[in-house]
Image: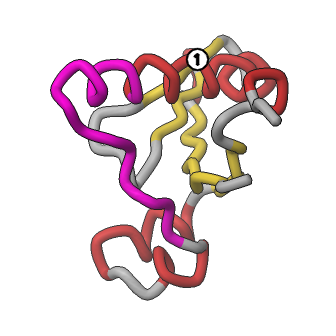
Amino acid sequence: MPHYVAIIEDGGPEGAVGLWFPDLPGCISGGDDIDEALENAPEALALYAKDLAEDGRQLPPPRTLDDLKADPEFADDLRNHTAVLIEWPPLADATG
């Protein structure tokens, strides 16, 4: 199963937590806490994949954490925030 790297950003005093995918520009998830943001992440991925499919495109292949750490565009984000792997498609949606 492929896994997309997601970066979790704490919302600070407001308490909200954001999560975004470096390989999927504009694909974000959020929640009142980390658990909720992680719970919402597969749905955000599904909606993103659906939008791409409607445009005749597919999700790009995920890069590894090491690949992203080597990318200057994301290196600081990975040093300053927590990164997690989100499985795609989610195990409940996998076939075969």
Number of marks drawn? 1
Q: Is residue 77 above or below residue 79?
A: above
Question: Can you give x and y, in whole percent of width and height, for residue 17 in the image?
Answer: 59, 26
Q: Residue furthest bottom?
A: 70
Judge the density around disc 1: few (<14), some (14-19), many (≥20) Cα neighbours within 10 Å: some
Give the farthest residue toward the left: 55
How was the colour assigned to the protein in this rendering? secondary structure
Q: Residue at the spot x=43%, y=29% of the render?
A: 28
Q: Main secondary structure of the magenta part?
A: loop
Q: Is residue 59 magenta?
A: yes
Q: Position of residue 43 (x, y in %)?
A: 58, 17
Q: Quadrant of residue 60?
A: bottom left
Tell me: residue 31, above or below residue 73: above
Residue type of the residue flagged with mark 1 = Glu
Q: Which residue is drawn at the image coordinates 43% and 17% (left, top)?
A: 47
Front position in the image: 15 or 53: 53
Q: Quadrant of residue 52?
A: top left
* Residue at figure coordinates x 43%, y 87% from the top left: 70
Residue 89 in picture, x, y percent from top left: 66, 35
Q: Secondary structure at mark 1?
A: helix
Residue with the mark numbered 1: 43
- Residue extent of the magenta highlight: 49-63
Q: Nearer the viewer, residue 39 or 87?
A: 87
Q: Is residue 81 left or right of residue 75?
A: right
Which quadrant holds the C terminus? top right
Quarter of image, res 58: top left
- Residue 5 is one of the magenta-drawn residues: no
Residue 25, compared with residue 89, is above or below; it is below
> Residue sitting at 46 percent across and 46 percent down?
21
Residue 64 vs residue 31, the one in the foreground: 64
- Drawn side of residue 20 relative to residue 57, left or right: right
